[in-house]
Amino acid sequence: MADKRKITVTVNGERYQREVETRMTLADFLRHELLLTGTHLGCEHGVCGACTVLLNGRTARACLTLAVQADGRSVTTVEGLAAPGGDLSPLQQAFWETHGLQCGFCTPGMLVTLTEFLNENPAPTEAEVREVLTGNLCRCTGYQSIVDAALLAAERMRTRA
Amino acid sequence: MKPAPFTYHNPKTIPEVVALLGKLDNAKVLAGGQSLMAMLNMRYAMPDNVVDLNDVDGLAGIELRGDALYIGAMTRQRDIEISPVVKTHCPLLVEALTNVGHRQTRNRGTIGGSLCQLDPSAELPTVAMAMDATISVQGKQGRRELAMADFPVTFMTPAIESDEIVTGVLLPLWPKGHGHAFVEFARRHGDFAVVGVAALLVVDASGRVSRASVTLCGVGARPIRVAEAEKCLLGAAAGPHAFRAAAVHAGAIDAMDDVHASKSYRQQLAATLAERALATALERTVPKT
């Protein structure tokens, strides 16, 4: 008999109730149960960072978190970063403009990581951006255009605020 | 990649945890999950029961207790890293933490989890060893305190019973003005260290070393205090000459040999990094006036 639990998770502001196997990861829960496939799975053991989401406002590897551990908590995925009307966040806009992605596989994790980072550190140095990006692997860009996007977004968010 | 089926338990109190661990067969304790969850996903570990500590009250927190710093086992690595109290009183721990994985893993990873995982290259057990920490353990028989020197039994094996958990760690603080450094070499920043060194230094008014701690990770099955290096530093004039002499002892450790690095390469790294760590620690020392 599979061990199951009923859980309630708020994802991108919406409450979801599901009965899940306790061994199901948060990443699989988001993708298979909620059909929020923006969260990507690369390595499934915590190295690549593609599955990074915000769990109660802090970045976490969704592949290293059980869905049951998100019970009663809130999750933000890449789908929750844009404004409700669909306008891109300043960070997403900057990624677009600086070509901060090529194949796009790592992008959801990059965006979520940098969203948390820029909230905490609105005026980062390039070295600080590169440091936080060590937790997310990209095999296309060589990171340069991602760093550019982060710095551009930070500058715009500062001048708008 | 999915974990094999298990039964999940999320107790709310320490007595509940201990009671569960006493009766469940083949149980694994889940802390921050940054190692165990990967092992479950890859089915390196296939426990019948997972006991999650994330909902247990009273296991997280940072507090000064006299001349020591107490950190609850479930305190997140990131919370320790950004704690003003830790920064002021125990800067070695902060520097070590900047080498532990990445911000995203430190948000979840815990100090107790890292101590119990006891990876030979892990930074936090190394700091605990460097500072002569005391580990608090709780089980069916009650509470007990364990010196960090006695905590690692062997490779990735802490001296706790299957019905016990680590509840916290007490780090005796070094005096104000002491120097510290955590230096490591890894293939990429955030990867497991090939070799790392924790150094602590107290220098007296005449510029002589009055207290020293030199600890290596990544060279053996457990973090290693280099007693010979510490002995040769005591009373010596703090500076490159003494540090080089001490580093020779670090390089003489019987290091392990594996796919990542040979024994002689590890020994060379241990010596080089020990010298660098001591030099950095000296730069950060504030002499008593």
Image (cartoon, coloured by chain):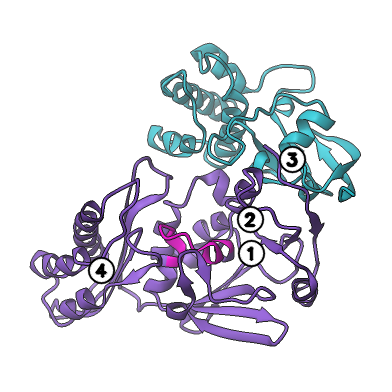
Which of marks 2 and 1 precedes in the sequence? Answer: 2
Residue B32's tag is 2
Element on which disc 4 rests: loop
> Disc 1 marks which amino acid?
Met
Instruction: Identify the chain of the residue marked 4, using the numbered disc in the image.
Output: B
Name the tint of chain B in the rendering.
Answer: purple
> Disc 4 marks which amino acid?
Thr
> Disc 2 marks which amino acid?
Gly
For the residues beneath circles 1 and 3, the answer to whether they share a chain is no
Nearer to us in this view, B208 or B31: B31
For the residues beneath circles 2 and 3, the answer to whether they share a chain is no
Task: Please name the residue shown 78% across and 78% down the image.
Answer: B15
For the residues beneath circles 4 and 1, the answer to whether they share a chain is yes
| Residue named by callout 1 | B74
Badge 4: how crowded within 10 Å, few (<14), some, or many (20+)?
some
Residue B278: percent from left, percent from top: 22, 64
